[in-house]
Image (cartoon, coloured by chain):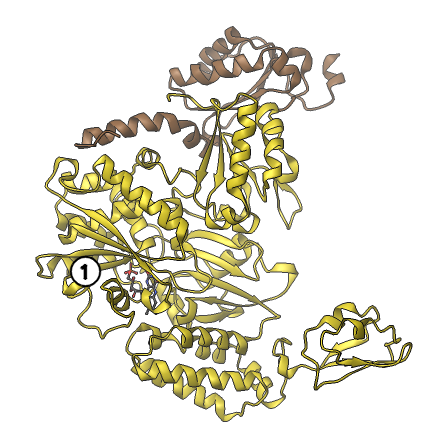
């Protein structure tokens, strides 16, 4: 048991890397270590997400910090034979800097990590999330211990207030203040709820924290329980997150076994325990009142606020709802102090924010940066710029509640207030990057389609209004829009925002409004010229054959799935527009540049 | 698992596991620590580099010197194996040749702890091996 390992192979066990067989890879690494009698010298450890999902599966070798990317099970043998036994890095698995074309030997020198600061993700990619001892070794549970043995609940609340931490679930409500309100709400029973619903398309921050460092959330919930006077915690998580659920369950069980959850924690009078509740993956159930209804066994529908959950929440009792990432920050704040934390970030937004980078960006993945980092730094330095050398067009933040920011916002320091001022919002931290090929009207339509699907239907503005918004956008993308539609979109958006019952409807028109603001010309091109400037809207596209270039090779006709192309051999062909489904197969096959899109 | 009943219990577990995780912790900020590379190609292993590496790891640990010991491929000084390269924070790397456990002990005691140089330094030049032999 007491082996001293000389080398560690950290294998990413996040959902992304798992789906490209990182678990098979791990088995093979173990097998080859054993074959070479190295199992007592080299330890293979499953960790949480390293963030560099674009190039997963990731294997990090310590102590030399070698960072291998896109490692397959077949590479296991070579890593053991070359790196572990002979000390030679496997060159072909090292990360190559796409700009400088140079091989990067360790993670420290990768542009992706250079500007990051990991607080919420401090243990992700470092510890084994299924081993409570590794969490404890990194100051785990020291914060809750300090709170319950040395501080009064009010002192902890003061510390949280001083830290300036604001909720990471979307609205950015000051966490300390929320705890104080819940602590002062009268009630014989109170609850701590962790919101792990994470319904934004493209977001996986909370999932990664739960997969990579579940104990940080468990510990923070106990701290919150101590502050507000609750002995029960509930984690609401979507059932589509099986790995996160598994690791949470292990974490809760280990904490119970060791006595860090349960009755009389650390010999004090403080009791706290946690249960998991499953959601069916509905976006609206991330909204705290709908979440509470869902946990009670009711339909996931929002209710009017006030009363806020802090006053009357789960089963009508005072309930403190916080987001996963919010919780993950708490133990560090207690350990290192509010003064340490509030030096990081901007004036009104302290600390860091985790973002899930997605879309047309080179380094798709999970990052954590200090508040105040600019969009340009995130997209071009950490994210490695736009895929395939294309031009940046917009970045969508805040998910379906947010908006699209453009070129002119690139140097904006990211924080809660700046994003709102720019017409978007922080949301939970999804960032979808778009390039010149993306049609902004279609993007707005995509988000509205999502909202229409996900609206709970309780209030008319959201249920009916969003559907109408969608229909207007739909006709514009089909070339049937009128200029009056633009006013209609604006007016209807305003009414929905003003009258919807919950945050879902109050923010759902944002993608429409922000694209109208930043890309008005694109709307006009669709409406007046029946033209989609990005060539995305199929109904506005026409594939045609230039008879001067066409040699009649018949390649296009043979590959057309709907037989829309006809013509004699060796004579120019034509496309029947009635039949054409605009799939683009003909363009791909034509060797003579004879087919073009109008 | 034993129950943690007090703050002291928690601290005990922490101290215990921390020791086991020290290496991983250190490699996160290796540039601020003493770094030692042991040449472990065929020639190095044949002449006992593995024993030296094991010794370095356990001796540094025993003396509580935060250091990162890694292995590398052939450094090109096959005639002088086992060879190790020692880099103290902010200093140029120094390569020592013919290192056995006795020499390794001397390197730790003298060079690493006090900065005093010991015999067996190979002038660092990354040119061809032939040049060095002359
Ligand atoms: C439509 C909608 C969806 C939401 N989804 C989430 C979610 O997935 N996760 C989350 O933490 N908060 C979500 N929220 C915000 C929650 O209502 C609540 O403000 C948050 O959980 C509070 O935690 P915080 O103060 O730590 O941010 C959503 C809000 C709305 C209106």
Any part of residue A11 in sight: yes
Q: In the figure, is residue A154 to the left or right of B64?
A: left
Residue drawn at the location 33% of the way across and 37% of the way down: A135
Label 1: how many Cα within 10 Å (few below 14, some 14–19, many 20+)? many
- As rendered, which of B68 and A73 lies closer to the eye? A73
Query: What quarter of the picture does the N terminus of chain A occupy?
Result: top left
Location of residue A176 with respect to A423 vertically, above or below: above
User: Which residue position holds label 1?
Assistant: A319
Q: Colour of chain B?
A: brown
Residue drawn at the location 84% of the way across and 71% of the way down: A592
Any part of residue A336 in sight: no
Residue A306 in the image, given as x and y percentages of width and height = 19, 72
Q: Colour of chain A?
A: yellow
Element marked by disc 1: strand
Location of residue A565 with respect to A191 vertically, above or below: below
Residue drawn at the location 80% of the way across and 75% of the way down: A557
Query: What quarter of the picture does the C terminus of chain A occupy?
Result: bottom right
Residue A233 in the image, given as x and y percentages of width and height = 22, 52
Residue A588 in the image, given as x and y percentages of width and height = 75, 68
The answer to whether the residue bearing label 1 lies less than 8 angstroms from the nearest atom of ligand 1 is no
State the image quarter where residue A206 is shown. Answer: bottom left
Residue pushed farthest top?
Answer: B102
Residue A355 in the image, given as x and y percentages of width and height = 43, 56
> What chain does badge 1 belong to?
A
Give the quarter the ligand 1 occupies. Answer: bottom left
């Amino acid at each position: 048991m007491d082996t001293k390992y000389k080398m560690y192979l950290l294998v990413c066990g996040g959902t992304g890397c798992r789906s490209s067989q990182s678990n098979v890879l791990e088995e093979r690494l173990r097998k080859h270590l054993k074959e070479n009698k190295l199992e007592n010298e080299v330890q293979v450890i499953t960790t949480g997400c390293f963030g560099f999902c674009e190039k997963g599966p990731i294997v990090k070798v310590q102590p030399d910090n070698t960072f291998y990317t896109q490692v397959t099970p077949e590479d296991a043998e070579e890593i053991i034979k070359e790196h572990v036994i002979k000390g030679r890095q496997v060159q072909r698995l090292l990360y190559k800097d796409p700009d400088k074309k140079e091989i990067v030997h360790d993670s420290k020198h990768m542009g992706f990590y250079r500007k990051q600061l990991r607080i919420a993700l401090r243990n992700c990619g470092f510890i084994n999330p299924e081993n409570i001892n590794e969490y404890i070794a990194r100051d785990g549970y020291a914060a809750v211990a300090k709170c319950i043995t040395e501080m009064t609940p009010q002192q902890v609340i003061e510390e949280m207030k001083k830290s300036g931490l604001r909720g990471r679930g979307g609205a950015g409500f000051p966490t300390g203040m929320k705890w104080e309100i819940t602590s002062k709400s009268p009630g014989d029973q109170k609850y701590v709820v962790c919101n792990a619903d994470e319904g934004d398309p493209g977001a996986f921050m909370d999932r990664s924290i739960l997969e990579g460092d579940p104990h940080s959330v468990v510990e923070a919930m106990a701290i919150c329980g101590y502050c507000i006077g609750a002995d029960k915690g509930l984690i609401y998580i979507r059932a589509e997150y099986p790995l996160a659920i598994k690791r949470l369950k292990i974490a809760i069980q280990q904490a119970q076994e060791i006595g860090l959850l349960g009755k009389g924690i650390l010999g004090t009078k403080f009791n706290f325990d946690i249960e998991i509740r499953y959601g069916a993956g509905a976006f609206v159930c991330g909204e705290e009142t709908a979440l509470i209804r869902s946990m009670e066994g009711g339909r996931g529908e929002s209710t009017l606020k006030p009363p806020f959950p802090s006053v009357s929440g789960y089963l009508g009792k005072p309930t403190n709802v916080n987001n996963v990432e919010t919780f993950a920050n708490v133990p560090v704040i207690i350990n290192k102090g509010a003064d340490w934390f509030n030096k990081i970030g901007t004036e009104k937004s302290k600390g860091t924010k985790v973002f899930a980078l997605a879309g047309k960006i080179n380094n798709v993945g999970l990052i954590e940066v200090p508040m105040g980092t600019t969009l340009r730094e995130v997209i071009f330095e950490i994210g490695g710029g736009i895929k395939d050398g294309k031009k940046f067009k917009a970045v969508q933040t805040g998910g379906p509640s947010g908006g699209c920011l453009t070129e002119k916002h690139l140097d904006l320091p990211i924080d809660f207030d700046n994003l709102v001022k720019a017409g978007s919002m922080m949301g939970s931290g999804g960032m979808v990057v778009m390039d010149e090929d993306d049609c902004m009207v279609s993007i707005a339509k995509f988000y509205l389609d999502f909202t229409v699907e996900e609206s709970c239907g309780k209030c008319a503005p959201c249920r009916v209004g969003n559907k109408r918004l969608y229909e207007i956008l739909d006709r514009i993308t089909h070339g049937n829009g009128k200029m009056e539609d633009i006013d209609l979109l604006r007016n209807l958006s305003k009414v929905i925002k003003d009258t919807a019952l919950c945050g879902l409807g109050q923010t759902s028109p944002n993608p429409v409004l922000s694209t109208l603001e930043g890309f008005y010309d694109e709307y006009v091109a669709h409406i007046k010229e029946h033209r989609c400037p990005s060539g995305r809207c199929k109904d506005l596209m026409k594939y045609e054959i230039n008879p001067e270039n066409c040699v009649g090779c018949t390649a296009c006709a043979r590959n057309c799935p709907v037989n829309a192309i006809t013509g004699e051999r060796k004579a120019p062909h034509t496309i029947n527009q009635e039949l054409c489904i605009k799939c683009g197969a003909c363009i791909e096959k034509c060797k003579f540049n004879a087919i073009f899109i109008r | 698992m034993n129950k943690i009943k007090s703050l002291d219990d928690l601290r005990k577990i922490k101290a215990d596991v921390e020791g086991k995780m020290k290496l991983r912790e250190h490699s996160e900020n290796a540039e601020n620590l003493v770094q030692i590379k042991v040449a472990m190609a065929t020639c190095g292993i044949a002449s006992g580099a593995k024993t030296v590496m094991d010794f370095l790891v356990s001796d540094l640990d025993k003396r509580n010197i935060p250091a990162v010991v890694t292995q590398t491929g052939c450094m090109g000084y096959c005639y002088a194996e086992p060879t190790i390269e020692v880099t103290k924070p902010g200093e140029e790397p120094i390569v020592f040749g013919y290192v056995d456990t006795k020499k390794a002990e001397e390197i730790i005691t003298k060079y690493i702890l006090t900065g005093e140089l010991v015999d067996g330094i190979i002038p660092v030049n990354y040119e061809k091996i032939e040049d060095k032999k002359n």
